[in-house]
Image (cartoon, helix red, strand yellow):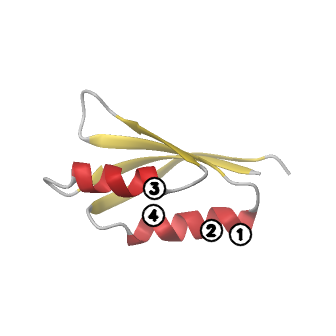
């Protein structure tokens, strides 16, 4: 069960678009920072395949400027 946390940076003026797309995704929690222009995303996928699909979905989101993996844990 891969659990990962990311910090997402978005293009200028694209925060709301990014958040709208992130909230549509399953298996993750979206936490917008209150004092910085970043979003924290925590994913919890049941399988490695679901985790890979989720990661690929993240990369396709318009307005996403940079995605940094902060922490990863696999409970195998």
Mark 3–mark 2 distance (CA, rounded to whole Å): 17 Å
Asked whether the beta carbons under mark 3 and mark 4 sit within 8 Å of each other, the answer is no
Q: Nearer the viewer, residue 1 or 66?
A: 1
- Callout 1–callout 2 Cβ contact below 8 Å: yes
Q: Name the residue tied to disc 2.
A: 52
**Of helix, strand and loop, which one carries label 4?**
helix
Residue 52 vertical placement versus 38 (above, below): below
Task: Give the CA separation, mark 1 to mark 4.
Answer: 14 Å
Report how far apart the C-alphas of labels 3 and 1 lie in the structure. Answer: 19 Å
What residue occupies the far right of the structure in this picture?
Answer: 76
| Left or right: 38 as drawn, with respect to 74 | left
Residue located 28% across and 28% down the image: 34
At horizontal 62% and vertical 68% (from top left) the residue drawn is 52
Q: Which residue is mark 4?
A: 58
User: Is disc 3 in contact with disc 1, using a CB cutoff of under 8 Å?
Assistant: no
Mark 1 lies on a secondary structure that is: helix
**Mark-to-mark CA distance, 2 and 4:** 10 Å
Give the crowd class for mark 3: few <14, some 14-19, many >=20 residues within 10 Å: few
């Amino acid at each position: 069960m891969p659990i990962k946390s990311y910090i997402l940076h978005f293009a200028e003026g694209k925060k709301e678009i990014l958040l709208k797309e992130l909230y549509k995704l399953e298996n993750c929690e979206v936490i917008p920072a209150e004092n910085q222009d970043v979003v924290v995303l925590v994913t919890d996928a049941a399988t490695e395949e679901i985790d890979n699909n989720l990661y690929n979905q993240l990369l396709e989101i318009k307005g996403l400027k940079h995605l940094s993996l902060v922490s990863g844990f696999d409970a195998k």
